[in-house]
Amino acid sequence: MAVDERIVRFIRKHHVLTLATLDTRTTQPYVSNCFYAYDATRNIFIFTSDVATRHGGELVSNPKVALSIVRETRLVGVIEGLQITGRAERGDEEAKRTYIKRFPYTAVAPLTLWMVHPEMMKLTDNKLGFGTKLIWQSEE
């Protein structure tokens, strides 16, 4: 099933996501914020994180993640937020090109890229009516 264009538009309007990982040894969750690029053709979120960081190490041991992207507002009528669950893996060359295109200054930086393949995305968009939710579910 194709991702609803309203979800894609929301993703493209933003550039920072919150990444939630889990240390499977201690079952302690952890969150971090990352700049991201989105490849709509492959339906993947791309971000960089060194494996020496806590969340980077947790991605190695447990690729199941949750992401969140939110519009900051105090106005109830325009609240928008996207929650995502998925699986992370190391980024490939195409992901690198996509990320550098979005953030050109990273072309000279050492990048440890990750790709998240969404399994579920839920956009809450009050502009469509209070509490309206658009849900996309992977067919895999």
Image (cartoon, helix red, strand yellow):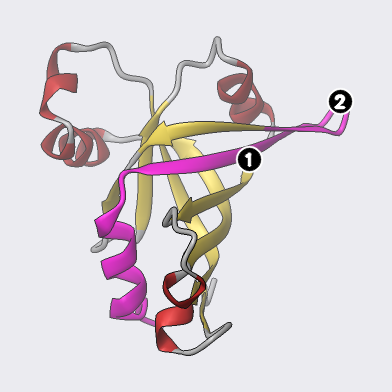
Q: Which range is magenta?
A: 1-30
In terms of image quadrants, where is residue 52? top right
Question: Which quadrant is the N terminus positioned in?
Answer: bottom left
Picture residue at 62% right of the left edge, 45% below the top: 65
Taking 53 as reference, is 70 left or right? Answer: left
Q: Position of residue 46 (x, y in %)?
A: 35, 41
Task: Name the outermost residue toward the front.
Answer: 75
Residue 34 at x, y percent in the picture? 43, 33
Residue position for label 1 = 20
Magenta stretch contains residue 109:
no
Image quarter of the C terminus: bottom right
Please tell me how crowded label 2 is: few (under 14), some (14-19), or many (20+) other residues with Cα within 10 Å: few
Label 1 sits on a secondary structure element that is: strand
- Percent from the top left, x then y, of residue 36? 34, 40
- From the image, tell me which residue sits under label 2: 25
Drawn side of residue 111 relative to residue 49, left or right = left
Q: Are marks 2 and 1 in contact (CB under 8 Å)?
A: no
Residue type at tag 2: Arg
